[in-house]
Amino acid sequence: MLEKLQSRKNKLDKKLKYIHSWRKVSCLIFVATFATVLICSVVAAAIAAPPVAAAVAAATSIPIGSMGKWIDSLWRNYENALKGQKEVISSMQAGTYVAIKDLDNIRVLIDRLEIEIESLLHNVDFAIEEEAVKVAIVEIKKKLGVFMKNVEDLGVQADMCSRDIRRARTVVLQRIIKHPNN
């Protein structure tokens, strides 16, 4: 799952880089267009009648500037949406990592419990074979204390894992709500 999230994050990074470049290009195009219209109007003013040239320059420069701002706002909105998705994926990665580590800790505790159970079963077999019940019972009581401690540790770790998973899920949901896809 972490690999899938990292792959998705890499794709979003590429898209963000692509969008950032296109946003700059579109801005340059509109600045160049605006400058061209302005230069052409000055030339037209010098050659033709000044009132006509001034009216043409005013009529063409306003829509070009507004259109440039509108397209820039579209790029910005798309870029912000992708940044929001990237934040959500980062939160999901962090939550997944914590959950995996907690589950690894639980696995270690379960392995310890399996070792303790095998030890207890060995003592029971010894008691049955050798009829040294009294000695075996003392050993079983010692092992039972360790076994119960491991069971308690496992319960604590399972509670902590559950709490961490709930916390990570809450963070991811808050990020999703904070940055809805438009």
Image: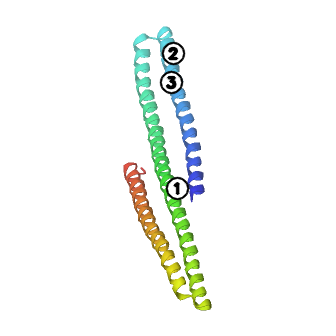
Which percent across, then down, holds residue 113?
A: 53, 73
Distance in Å between CA atoms under marks 3 and 1: 46 Å
Q: Nearer the viewer, mark 1 or mark 2?
A: 1
Category of crowding for the residue at label 2, using alpha-carbon neighbours closer than 10 angstroms: few (below 14), some (14–19), many (at least 20): few
Query: Mark 2 is on which residue type?
Result: Ile
Residue in the picture at 55% in, 46% down: 12
Distance in Å between CA atoms under marks 1 and 2: 59 Å
Front position in the image: 85 or 20: 85
Above or below, comparing residue 107 to residue 135 in the picture: above
Category of crowding for the residue at label 1, using alpha-carbon neighbours closer than 10 angstroms: few (below 14), some (14–19), many (at least 20): some
Distance in Å between CA atoms under marks 2 and 3: 12 Å
**Numbered mark located on residue 31 in the image:** 3
Which percent across, then down, holds residue 76?
A: 46, 38
Mark 3 vs mark 1: which is more N-terminal?
Answer: 3
Query: Mark 1 is on which residue type?
Result: Tyr
Mark 2 vs mark 3: which is more N-terminal?
Answer: 3
Q: SS for tag 1?
A: helix
Front position in the image: 45 or 80: 80
Above or below, comparing residue 76 to residue 106 in the picture: above
Residue that numbered label 2 is attached to: 39
Front position in the image: 101 or 113: 113
Residue in the picture at 53% in, 58% down: 101
State the residue lying farthest toward the top: 46
Q: Do tag 2 and tag 3 residues touch (Cβ < 8 Å)?
A: no
**Numbered mark located on residue 97 in the image:** 1
State the residue lying farthest toward the right: 129
Which percent across, then down, holds residue 41?
A: 48, 16
